[in-house]
């Protein structure tokens, strides 16, 4: 037991990692970033109607308390004094919307989940949300489309030459973001309408609901959010860093129900006891960090420099590139968002965000649909047997191409097949497809912001596949860097909390961050070969387009003359028949 005590060399920091499928609480050593203990609780998703996805806010809150209490028990078993926990950070699923009664503390409706990935042309793209595996919110693929009609009616009110929503928020008008879900609740849920009329309603994303509840709820709970979560509501001006009056009027949202916007790293309030849940192990500990999950991963990956990027590999991929203090708008289907603001008096950093719809999902498709593998882990073994795709390319456009193409007519193809091709080559091509798609997003980021990428930080479940990581380095032709501690989302929230003014137990100085162990994958092919493979991939992508047309056979031109050779044949046959009948005198 003495060895366990000795391992704790400094103050500890806790992190709530609240995702779509589970909640976790993790405790880190602030001096070494070592993960000491954690606990995880699964949470349910509810599907009241087709296309609707909801979660119970009270279940989410209870899961947070349970994770905190259980983790503290585990620390006690390790002879680690929980009084060493000096701060708590919160990382959360973004955009999911909660409205509750500030007098009773009761939610007025279930939390309305966000669709998984927005796009300028396609309302939603299927990609994951969350952090590293097995993490809160990993590989949850869901779609809440109840607000589609709301989006359609709102879009008609935006002038074609003045998209003030995108210019102020960096976001396309989409079912993805909180404003349209909140508008739906105001239009369709009488309890919400009444509470707003009676000045009892509070709105927030999951972070706001948790911080308000954990800091006392009806007894003085703090109603706030941070800039990263606020920037995903579509009500927040990312330039002035304030709720925008014009946007709130456009969506019809009363500004008095919105949370106060704070930085990502400052003391918001102190943990209070929950008498109803008999939970109070960390009473009095400050909650001092708050980041949306992808921003938390960016911080956890220590992408603090202009041009640094991270990619989270799950069912799909989330890519964020730090653009520094510059707010870069994309011409290639990427989103502009707030990356972080690590202190009240610290500058804001922005990011470009892009997503790959199909990453780990293609491995599952090979397993479940084709039966090429029995477990997802087998793909690395198959790919290793051949070490090449032997000219086989796999474009997994199962439901169209997303960023940077936004081409809904595309469908998945496997091309370049020969008699020599076998399942190992297809497995290798599937891994390459993940890497090629990542390069396309990063190329788009480079074109938008002109920042050359020196290396790519990676995290997520698929990063345990060493073949994939080496392929990614080869195809990007830059090093790929993977942290030895995979819990980057929770780590980012803990870092923000520990670095807050008034806490000061976690240094974010570069010389102190370099101690984190990384696994580095360097390119092992020459640049010419990398470019040839990438250009061939792009040729395959072009072949995947146009498979689905808007004109169905039933609605197409029924004329037999739509085929020119057939038309000539029929016309000449009719002329000959008429001529023959005329010559023969047949009436």
Image: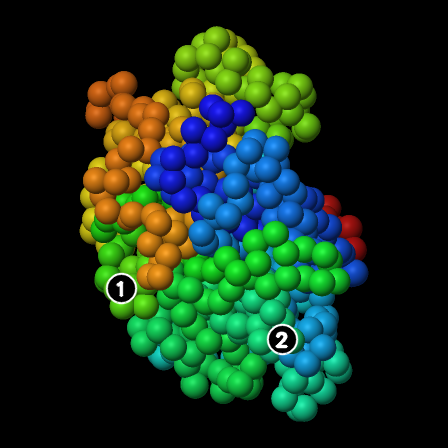
Q: Taking 403 as reference, is 478 above or below it?
A: above
Q: Quadrant of residue 146?
A: bottom right
Residue 586 visible (yes or no) = yes
Residue 178 lies left or right of residue 471; in this view the side is: right
Helix, strand, or loop for circle 1? loop
Place of residue 314 in the rendered image (x, y in percent of width and height, measured from the top left): 52, 38
Q: Name the residue rendered at 53%, 73% in the picture.
A: 223
Q: Taking 295 as reference, is 155 above or below it?
A: below
Residue 492 visible (yes or no) = no
Q: Taking 372 as reference, is 225 above or below it?
A: below
State the residue in front, 354 or 574: 354
Q: Name the residue rendered at 43%, 29% in the picture.
A: 7
Please state, as top left, top right, bottom left or bottom right, where the C terminus lies in the image.
Answer: bottom right
Q: Which mark is residue 219?
A: 2
Q: Name the residue rendered at 49%, 25% in the picture.
A: 2
Count of numbered badges drawn on the protein: 2
Q: Which mark is residue 346?
A: 1
Q: Name the residue rendered at 50%, 18% in the picture.
A: 380
Place of residue 432 in the rendered image (x, y in percent of width and height, measured from the top left): 43, 27
Mark 1 vs 2, N-terminal side: 2
Helix, strand, or loop for circle 2? loop
Residue 222 lies left or right of residue 498; in this view the side is: right
Q: Quadrant of residue 143?
A: bottom right
State the residue in front, 498 or 572: 498
Place of residue 389 in the rendered image (x, y in percent of width and height, measured from the top left): 44, 18
State the residue in front, 161 or 210: 210
Q: Taking 383 as reference, is 357 above or below it?
A: below
Mark 1 or mark 2: which is in front? 2
Q: Which mark is residue 322?
A: none
Using the numbered discs, state the Cα–Cα distance from disc 1 to disc 2 in whole angstroms: 31 Å
In the image, farthest residue toward the bottom: 198
């Amino acid at each position: 037991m003495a060895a366990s005590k000795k391992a704790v060399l400094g103050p500890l920091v806790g992190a709530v990692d609240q995702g779509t499928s589970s909640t976790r609480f993790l405790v880190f050593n602030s001096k070494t970033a070592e993960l000491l203990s954690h606990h995880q609780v699964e949470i349910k998703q509810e599907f009241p109607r087709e296309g609707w996805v909801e979660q119970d806010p009270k279940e989410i809150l209870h899961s947070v308390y349970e994770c905190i209490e259980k983790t503290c028990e585990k620390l006690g078993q390790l002879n680690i004094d929980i009084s060493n926990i000096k701060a708590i950070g919160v990382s959360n699923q973004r955009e999911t919307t909660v409205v509750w009664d500030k007098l009773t503390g009761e939610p007025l409706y279930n939390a309305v989940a966000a669709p998984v990935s927005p796009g300028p042309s396609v309302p939603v793209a299927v990609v994951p949300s969350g952090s590293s595996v097995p993490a809160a919110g990993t590989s949850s693929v869901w779609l809440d489309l109840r607000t589609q009609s709301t989006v359609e009616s709102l879009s008609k009110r935006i002038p074609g030459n003045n998209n003030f929503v995108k210019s102020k928020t960096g976001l396309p008008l989409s079912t993805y973001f909180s404003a349209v879900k909140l508008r739906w609740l105001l239009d369709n849920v009488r309890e919400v309408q009444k509470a707003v009329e009676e000045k009892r309603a509070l709105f927030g994303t999951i972070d706001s609901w948790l911080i308000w509840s954990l800091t006392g709820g009806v007894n003085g709970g703090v109603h706030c959010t941070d800039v990263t979560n606020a920037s995903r509501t579509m009500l927040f001006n990312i330039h002035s860093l304030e709720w925008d009056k014009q946007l709130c009027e456009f969506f019809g949202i009363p500004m008095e129900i919105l949370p106060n916007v704070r930085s990502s790293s400052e003391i918001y309030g102190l943990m209070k006891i929950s008498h109803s849940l008999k939970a109070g192990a960390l009473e009095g500990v400050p909650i001092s960090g708050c980041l949306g999950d992808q921003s938390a991963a960016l911080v956890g990956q220590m992408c603090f420099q202009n041009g640094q990027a991270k990619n989270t590999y799950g069912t799909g991929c989330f890519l964020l590139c730090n653009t520094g203090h510059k707010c870069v708008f994309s011409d290639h289907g990427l989103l502009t968002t707030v990356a972080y603001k690590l202190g009240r008096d610290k500058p804001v950093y922005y990011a470009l965000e892009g997503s790959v719809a199909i990453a780990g999902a293609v491995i599952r498709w090979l397993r479940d649909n084709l039966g090429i593998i029995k477990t997802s882990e087998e793909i690395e073994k198959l790919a290793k047997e051949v070490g090449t795709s032997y000219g086989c390319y796999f474009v997994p456009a199962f439901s169209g191409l997303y960023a940077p193409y936004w081409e809904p007519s595309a469908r998945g193809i496997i091309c370049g097949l020969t008699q020599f091709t076998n399942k190992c080559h297809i497995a290798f091509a599937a891994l390459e497809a993940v890497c090629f798609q990542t390069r396309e997003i990063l190329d788009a980021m480079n074109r938008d912001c002109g920042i050359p990428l020196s290396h790519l930080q990676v995290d997520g479940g698929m990063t345990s596949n060493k073949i994939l990581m080496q392929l990614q380095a080869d195809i990007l032709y830059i090093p790929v860097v993977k942290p030895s501690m995979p819990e980057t989302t929770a780590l980012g929230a803990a870092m923000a909390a520990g670095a807050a003014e008034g806490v000061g137990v976690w240094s974010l100085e570069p010389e102190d961050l370099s101690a984190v162990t990384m696994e580095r994958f360097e390119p092992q092919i020459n640049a010419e070969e990398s470019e040839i493979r990438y250009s061939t991939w792009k040729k395959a992508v072009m072949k995947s387009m146009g498979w689905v047309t808007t004109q169905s056979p039933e609605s197409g031109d029924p004329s037999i003359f739509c085929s020119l050779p057939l038309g000539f044949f029929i016309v000449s046959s009719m002329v000959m028949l008429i001529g023959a009948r005329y010559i023969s005198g047949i009436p």
